[in-house]
Amino acid sequence: MSTNPHAHENLIDSDTGKMGMWLFLFTELFLFGGLFLVYAVMRTKYAADFHHAALELNAFVGATNTVALLFSSMTVAMSLTAIQQQKSGKAIGLIFITLLLAGVFMVNKYFEWGHKFSLHLYPGSDVMKTLPHGEIVFFGLYFMMTGLHAVHVLIGGILLTLVMFKIGSGKIRHDHFLMHENSALYWHLVDLIWIFIFPLLYLIT
Amino acid sequence: MTYTSSEPLNYLNHKTGLWSWLTSSDHKRIGLLYLYAITIFFCAAAILGLLMRIEKMAPGQTIMTAQTYNGMFTIHGIIMIFIVVIPGLAAVFGNIFLPIMIGARDVAFPKLNLFSWYIYIFGAILGLYSQFANGHSPDTGWTFYVPYSAEASSNVVIALTAAFVLGFSSILTGLNFIVTIHRMRAPGMTWFRMPLFPWSLYATAWIQILATPIIGITLLMVMAERLFHIGFFDPALGGDPVLYQHLFWIYSHPAVYVMILPAMGVVTEIFPTFSQKPVFGYVPIVFSSLAIALVGYFVWGHHMFTSGMSYESRWFFSLLTFIVAIPSAIKVFNWLSTMYGGSVDLKPPLLYAISFIFLFTIGGFTGLALGSLATNIQLHNTDFVVAHFHYIIFGGMGFGFFAGIHYWFPKIYGRMYNFKWAYISWGFLFTGFNLLYFPLFVIGIQGMPRRYFDYDPKFQTGEFLSTIGAFILIAGLAGMISNLVYHARKGPKAEANPWHGVTLEWQVPSPPPHENFDEIPVITHEPYLFDKPATK
């Protein structure tokens, strides 16, 4: 506590850095919490419409994505163990697998959204206007929740890519891996939020 | 700033040039960057307020059209709330003094701190841009209520983005302060040896972290509604406009405590110093801050008593509103008791702090009138509400800020302002303030609605008096600001501890050196121990 933080200008002590990250993750949970709240209110109001609209979603695609994210959470955790054991090459490889799994998720998502658009199931479309209110709200929530989540997947992917390069250049090492750890925490958050989104949207029929 | 080379190095002169300021991660310099930005925006929005008052001097159109008036009260609200008052005390005095008061050299994340300032400036510029782009200033009011905000043809999306960005800056500042307080306290500074201003910042920071994301997602949903026709709040698409109001106030009521808690913290520092007596009831003040933060999170429904809620929710929110008044009242008793029996020295900071109690108490009591279900029906959406929240926000946070700047000015600049000038400006400010806002209580009770461009001639006496008050208030502001600006450079040198304060910021030179302390102090006792009553 009494050490001078400027004595080593670029190093924030790791407990301090992690605490900041955890607080930031709280704010992310509250951000999505707002959407979950709207979901809860609307689902109560339009239970039957939600049931019907959710039939449009392909639970197999959703489940594939869930598995992909769960595995990616595992590989990112393993990469953190690898860096602590001074195995940089292995850590880079594991992060690379994490990024591949994130890619699988995003490609799947792309086709899923594309399919909805081809059916004219997007907000403001001609088909959408003919649907009952509850279904319009369901698809609105679907695009908003999965869209915002996809943005987080992208941010997490960028962070992990940076981490990968920093391990390569030796800036992240076994005794200095705060950014690696925080990025991994962020990646777990992305995974965690998806674990709630998946049943709420895909498995309620 | 120009200093002669004979002066000792401090945070103002150890590096010079604009670039050294814009890239500085020194918490004191960042605090000053906030201070200057906030002062500029405050003056701009105050002038908008004056123009609105001139418009309402007489019934009918006087100096602007109804549409301009709508744009003006919107941008006045957006600037004052999101750009001035919410960051306000925490960003300025919190940044400058939090690390010093807990015996640290800087905040936990100095670069993130500078980054927050840039986000803040970016958001503020977006806010201004929304006012001027394409000549369609937003006209929704700062509350952005749907369905109007989803349909209005003005620059609502830009204004929403601005509020979103500013919220992000607020979150990062709050996060930084929480970690700083947890991790950076000097050896021996236990939680209950921490001064009370840091305590109030701690409570505030938790509200910032827990409430701001909700407004973030809500504003994103309104944007999605406008840009992509997603109907969360539009009844024609199955949405619910009252749901928007819930989400909006889940943030925006706690935001009131983000504004007022740091101001309470500032005056809590001032009373012991100018009474030369330990603060009365340290522990109750700590817990009342935390209680305000906690209970304040659950009272948002009192903004919506007339919007359509079940009877049970209404009495529940009303009850909680009355409960949240208790910790505020505890603080008022503590401040008064701190002065009781002390050597009270009515210097300008104390004068402002006492005005704070007076105005805040009026604002608080009228808040209870709004929080009771029966009277709320009569008073909702009248000028009574406008008067109430200006007494809280301007009379509370504003005067708390003025108290703080007069208290810490010699520490920040190492120079002293002119007392006589300060007293006269205070006289104008206090008179003008009450003349401006008190008549609004009266015409509000008589039924004058808020946000109206025109009014029934029977309200003219009140509206006219209020406008006269606005002129006096602006004169007082001009006097106060010019006193401070002039003496920041030309004032006589101040001693390191002109008020005989005992908290850590008074133990370092004025202005403080670059990293605050040559040697980190070791804390061995409670924060407010005065040796003996000061001799006058």
Image (cartoon, coloured by chain):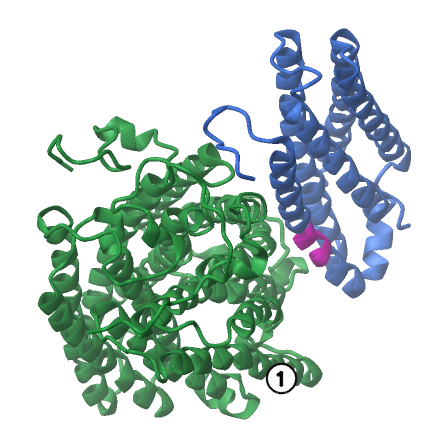
Chain colours: A blue, B green
Residue nearest the observer in this picture, B164 or B185: B185
Kind of residue sitting beneath label 1: Leu
Residue B373 drawn at (x, y percent): 56, 88
- Residue at 50%, 36% in the rendered image: B109
Q: In the displayed structure, does residue B151 sit left or right of residue B207?
A: left
Residue B393 drawn at (x, y percent): 37, 69
Query: What range is drawn magenta here?
Result: A33-38
Image vertical order of residue A13 relative to residue B339, above or below = above
Quarter holding the C terminus of chain B is bottom left
Quarter holding the N terminus of chain B is top left
In the rendered image, which residue does mark 1 sit on? B319
- Residue at 63%, 63% in the rendered image: B235
Residue B291 found in image quarter: bottom right
| Magenta stretch: includes residue A37 | yes
Residue B192 drawn at (x, y percent): 56, 61
Residue B453 found in image quarter: bottom left
Secondary structure category for the residue under label 1: helix
Instruction: Answer yes or no: is residue B228 visible.
Output: yes
Q: In the displayed structure, does residue A79 sit left or right of residue B31?
A: right
Image vertical order of residue B432 relative to residue B78, above or below = below
Overall secondary structure of the magenta stretch? helix
Residue nearest the observer in this picture, B142 or B7: B7
Residue nearest the observer in this picture, B448 or B35: B35
